[in-house]
Structures are given as C-alpha cells and as structure tokens.
Image (cartoon, grey):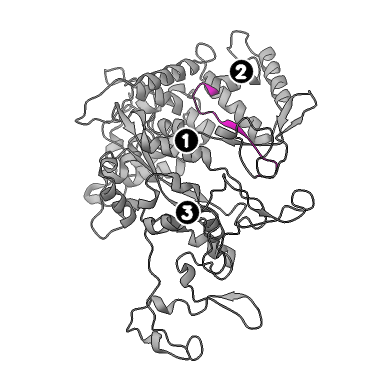
Amino acid sequence: MESRSWMYTRTNDGRRGMRQEFMDGVVAFVEYAMTLEPFIIEDLVRCPCEKCACRNYETPEIVRLHLYTHGFQLNYTVWTSHGETDTGLGGFQNFVVGESSRSTEPDVQNYRMHDMIQDAYGMHSNFESSNHVEEDPNEEATRFFEQLKDDSRPLCDGSPHPQLSIAVRLISIKADWNVPQGAMDAVISLIRELVDPNLEIHVNYYKVKRLVSKLGLSSYRIDCCENRCMLYYKDDVSLESCKFCGRARFKRARSGKRVGFKAMHFLPLIPRLKRLYASNSSAPHMRWHSENRRSPGVMCHPSDGEAWKHFDRTYPDFATEPRNIRFGLCSDGFTPHSLSAAPYACWPPLIDELKLLWVEGVDTFDVSRRQNFHLQATLMWTINDFPAYGMLSGWMTTRKLACPYCMENTKSFTLKYGHKNSWFDCHRQFLPMDHEFRSMKNAFRKNTIERNCPPPRLSGEDIWERVQNFPKVTEEAPYKFDGYGSAHNWTAPYKFDGYGSAHNWTKQKIFWDLPYWEDNLLRHNLDVMHIEKKLL
C-alpha cells in the first residue's frame, strides 16, 4: 500500500522551497478529483486544503494553488470526501502518486446534493465540531432531506447517476438551448427505448419538472397589466382589467383557454434562504462576519461600516443572532423614472416576504451546527446607478432638483446658451469653512465665493414626514398623455403640487412599508463603477 506521508511534508528542511514529491502528489490528486462527478458536471473540485477543509468547491487551478499555499487539512490521508472508503485498518482506495486515475469511476456520493444528505444525517467526515447542543431537523427540514435522499437514488444498482441529477441536467439543457417541451419529450422517449428498461428514467419532461419541484424551489406566475401598470396580486387578483388604464387582463389562446396578456415569474425568497443553511458548503459562511472580527479601523466587510453597527444598536435582539440575514438589493435602471414607460409595480411580493421575515421570521435548520433556529432578515440598503436611484427612492433624479442630497437647497443653474441644468461649483459648500477654495473668486464660478454651510442631512424620520402623504405606484396611476397605449407609451411623473420647484417627489416608495426602513442609516448606495462606465 502506497504511503501518503508526502501530504504533510510540503517543504524541504529549513523551509527552503517546496518538495518535488509534494508537488507531484498535488498534481496527481487534482487529476484524480477531476474524474469525480462534481468536475464532470460542473467543472469543480472539492478543495481539501487546510482552510477550505472540503467545504468549498473550486476550479482545479484554484485547488492546486490552495494546496501549494496552505497544504492539506489534517488527518486526511484517506480521501473520504473524494470517494474513498476508510476500512478502519489504514486501508483506502488504491491510488498511486504519479499514476493516472482517469479510469476511476465517478463516486455519486461526492456530488453536492449527496453532500447535503450526508450533512443532514451526520455522515459527513469533516463535520464541524463545537460546544453546542445538536438537534434533529425540524419537520419541514426532515421532509426536505428525506425527499432529497429519495430522489437521489441511482438509476439502477451500480449506476453513478442519481435520478435528481439527470432531472436537473435535462432542465438545464432545455433552458440553455431553448428546446421546446415536445422535443424534450421525444428525446426522453428515445432514451427510454435505447437503455436498459430497468433504469428508472422519467416518462416525460412534465415528470422531470415534478421531481425537481419537490425540492421546494418553485416560482410563481403573476399576471400583470399589458401596459405594466399593475400586478394582479392579493386584493387585485380577481380583476378582469387594469384598474389604471382599463386594458383587458386576458386573451383567448388557440386552444380557447383564457391566458394573461403578460405575466411575471416570482422566485420566493424564503425557501432559498433555508437551502443556504441546508448544506455545509454554505451554512458556515453565513456566520463569517460574526466569527471573523476585524481590528478597529479596518473595513473589509459591510459589518465593519457604521450603517451596520447603527442597525445593531437600534435592534439589539436582531443582532444577537449572527445567522440572521441582511440584504442589499442590487438594481439597474430598468423602466427608469417613469419617463419612457409606465412604472412597473413588481415589488409587492418581495416586500411581503421581507415583512414576514422581519415580523414573524421562519424556523430553519442549520446543518453546520445541527440546530434549529428562528431566522429573520432585513433589507439594509439598495445598490444602484443614478437613474435607478430615482426609481427606488421616489425622488426623481432629473431636472434642476435632481440631487437627492441637496434637494430643494440645490445650487444648480441653467446654462445661458445650452439651456441645460448644471451643477458646476455646487460642491464647495461641503468644504471646511476655513478652506482656501471657498474664498477663490475666479477659480470656479466667476465672481463667486462660498460662505454657506452644506445642506442638512435628513434622517429617516425626516424623510418619512415628507413622503408619507404621497401615494404609492400601486395606489395611483401616473399622468399619461393623450394617445397613451395606442400611439405611444409616454408618461410623466405624478403632478404633485410644487413638483420641480419645491421638491422632486413622484411617489411614496413601497420600501417604507418595511417597519425598520426609516431606521436604516444608509438606504441607497450609488454604484460608482456602473455610473462611471456610462459616463465614459
């Protein structure tokens, strides 16, 4: 039996370079790992370095680099997470350093869904140990793991391919190549004719989707107005026409069945959050910010920022559970401003889930600690470019009052000949009062010195006082020009008193429905890289 002592003799005596035997062994190990199913399906290898400890999947190049840098995790001479079986007598699957292992059969237990089963039932060889009380999964988690285990049966005895893996690959093929469902049914039927009848292959594509849907990661179809005015959701679910523009909701399909003119698909958030805690590949990382504290003055994670700390001080009960989740919502400027299209009210389903996660929370099983806990979540901020800022905040980012910080205190002006708004020399007011630039008459705007203080920074409570009486997109339609919906789709912002001169508010954004939104210190972040790309 070949010794694997080379795994823990990485460097030469006196740390003078890396041993050639170790480098050859790493190369051979990576070649062997590339014969396993994670690489065959996803081009990934489970990394056994000291830091990853078989919890992460990386590309072969990254795994090789990790092993050269950190070495192998301790006591891993039997590669149990890479298909080998520990006999208890020091034996392991025959593997010789330097020999090719391409003939090795892929071990189905190394694929990720099998890792989840092993994690759930305590069979993972690298299970995290700690001084905490272990519990059985709650009822919902138990059903999920049992369903996952049942769906992961091999097609037949000795087959390396589980049913769920085949189903997921078929769905992926259909989506990647836009294959019609009828064609998928024909292909599946042909496969069933060509292979051993004892193989438990799905009858048709409908059965494939049924199998995958049992994992709980489904989507919901919600009808919406053809002109994107509203969603037929909750109180509006039974409406036959749009309550704003009057357009009909349904049309007749060729089959005679009524179908919606337009629909959106919503991916529920809560089941996907629970899945993050159902695998050891992701669950430990959900606590990283709490278990890897940085030195004061060092910022390498949002938890080091003042906005995060302010929220912890405001809601200490939420902060005591490090597994609670904090979201940042990234959005580009789709249908921005309501200038070129009607505002699209796609947020209500998401907001309902966020309110549930904050007010009630959901019971979740953390497989890395084998504990049930009550999961809550909060939306900390949005991340967007400047056009999307107007969409997400409700303050229109166009015209003279475009700046959402200065607001009505802006010093913007209109160019004499270009007749466009300019914000040149609006920034000296933010300098210290004794700064030399403030007194320069001709270096900025001609014959202008700056003596004013910067505009006041409004708190969440101050902003709520301003917007609380404005309607939401879901409550009032925007102003529409003659011919809208037939000759064009142009709209304008809500025409509130003082709009464009005293304020730029166009709506009350639905984020204010969240109980904690006005307590967030930083509600909107500008994606500087995205903005610079557009300007350049």
Within-10-Å neighbours for mark 2: few <14, some 14–19, many 20+: few
Q: Looking at this view, is 466 or 402 the one in front?
A: 466
Q: Is residue 274 left or right of residue 206?
A: left
Q: Position of residue 258 (x, y in %)?
A: 73, 27
Sequence-wise first label, 1 or 3: 1
Q: Tags 2 and 3 in contact by the CB under 8 Å rule?
A: no
**Residue 269, numbered circle:** 1
Within-10-Å neighbours for mark 1: few <14, some 14–19, many 20+: some
Q: Looking at this view, is 363 or 19 the one in front?
A: 363
Q: Which residue is mark 2?
A: 207
Q: Which secondary structure class fits the magenta region best?
A: loop
**Mark 2 to mark 3 CA distance (whole Å):** 40 Å
Residues rendered magenta in the picture: 213-228
Q: Which residue is mark 3?
A: 383
Q: Secondary structure at mark 1?
A: helix
Task: Say if residue 35 shows up in the picture.
Answer: no
**Mark 1 to mark 3 CA distance (whole Å):** 18 Å
Quadrant (top left/top right/bottom left/bottom right) for the N terminus: top left
Q: Secondary structure at mark 2?
A: helix
Quadrant (top left/top right/bottom left/bottom right) for the C terminus: bottom right
